[in-house]
Amino acid sequence: MFKYFKLLGIFWKFSVLRELEYRANFLTNAFMSVFWLFWGIIGTTIFFAHSDTLGGWTYEQVLVVLGLYTMFLGIMEAFFRPNITEMIEHVRVGTFDFVLVKPVNAQFYASFHSLTMWRLADVVAGAGLILYALRAMGLTPTPTQWLAFALLLAVALILVYCIWLGMMTMSFWFVKIDNFAELFYAFYETGRFPISVYGGLLRAFLTFVIPIAFITTFPASALMALLDPMELLIGLGLAFLLLGFTNRLWRFAVRSYASASS
Amino acid sequence: MAMAIWILSASFPLVMMAVWLSLAQNGPVGDFSAGDFVGYYLLSFYVRQMTAVWVAWELDYDIRHGDLNTKLLHPLQPIHEYISFNLADKAIRGILFTPVVIALALLLPQIQIAPTPSNLVFFVLALTGAWILRYLAQFSLGMFTFWFSQALVLTDVFWMLYLLFGGSVAPLELLPEPLQTIAFYLPFRFMLSFPVEILMGRLTTPEILNGMVISALWCLGLFGAYRLLWARGIRHFGAFGA
């Protein structure tokens, strides 16, 4: 276990060192994070020019959801996107064999080998927006609410990891899976707004099939005393199930992997 | 397969439509009923598909990898080659989507559009104008790769402004001030919203003609920008790896 933390430190250190060579990237990414955030806020105000609530949520409450949306966008782009890109290349060229022969768990290596540090700017921007919105509402969450929030954040992180691991696993069968990532982002787009905005089937789909609601809406509810404890329980159950399932799927895929050109 | 996913993933307007529909449940928003929103986003989906442009990414790749060298040796300016690929894609998308959009417009009775013969002619003209504007704008932005390696950021910023001021986040009529006035002075309206407004029957003939003139002026302006940037850029271009 300790070995893996140490390895993680080494992987990330090398990723960071590699990126420090391109400092202009940092400036453009920071600029884009801020621009994108303001753009999202302006977009939200347009809807509130015509209504006081959106799916029963006030303007500031929707901003908290937008903050979580931005944070998780940053997390996915920083931690998962670079690894899926490498994975596609490994499977396509056949160098995934070298990952398998390394004396570490191949899933760990494939999932966490690279990091795009600059995209963490989105995480900072999103967290800033959440704190701003809480302050604007004059809300100070109680310790229990913070705890529920922390638990739901952990659930969201696990769910996001499972989704990306699932997509990575698909690369064994359909090499060009960067399109899958685009398709997932198409659904993720709905996470800008609270889940109550969407009607019937779409809402059920976004809660249980592609659980976007657990990534942005429910952690936001936890901070603002809008959470139904059942949602927390369902979230924990869903995270547990999905983690078990995607891990199995990965192991199954690795067993049937026959390298390129063989 | 790849193309199907790219098309599906143009989900942003669908999400915006879902949010507007949730607002339109208890009566119309401004001048828009629920059926108007569906019609508006259906048409804007069609306009977006038929004006899709990705030349900035091609240019960025070709300039940074030096593939532009080969293209410069051809007897025609490289823009012709890029355009011909884009037009081939438009032919496929046209065959795919024109029947789908017509069928949906006929099947969903609540959709309000006004496909009179004159509106249809104006729509096709405005659609062509929208494609020309998007193409020239993206080509011009893509050429900044001649000077900075991070130039694609400009395309991203442009894209966000297009979504906001072109009428994808909201129909331009529903933008609050001062955004609505700003949108009126920017070219983005003519890249998306203008053809949609025409086919929805929301513009009078003088308004349409007036829009056509402004759109043509933007086309000229962007063509000038393209010529200028190309002349300067090509002189600056040192051919990577040469």
Image: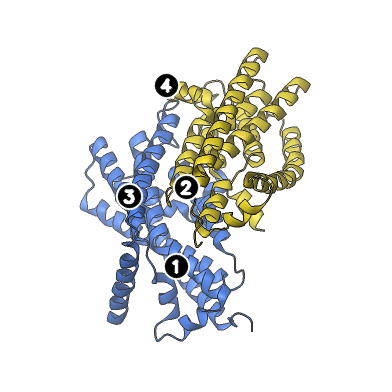
Q: Is residue A164 above or below residue B57?
A: below
Looking at the image, tell me whether mark 3 or mark 1 is earlier in sequence order: 3
- Determine crowd level at label 3: few under 14, some 14-19, many 20+ residues with C-alpha closer than 10 A: few
What whole-number distance in Å separates the C-alpha atoms at marks 4 and 1? 44 Å
Please say which color scheme the image uses.
by chain
Q: Nearer the viewer, residue B61 or A11?
A: B61
Q: Can the viewer see residue B15?
A: no
Q: Secondary structure at mark 1?
A: helix
Mark 4 surroundings: few (<14), some (14-19) or many (≥20) residues within 10 A: few
Q: Position of residue B143 (x, y in %)?
A: 51, 45
Closest to the camera, between mark 4 and mark 3, is: 3
Looking at the rendered structure, which numbered label has been put on residue B236? 2
Is residue A261 positioned above or below B159 on the image? below
Contact (CB < 8 A) between labels 1 and 2? no
Closer to us: mark 3 or mark 1?
3
Give the colour chain B carries in the figure. yellow
Q: Colour of chain A?
A: blue
Q: Name the residue type under label 2.
A: His
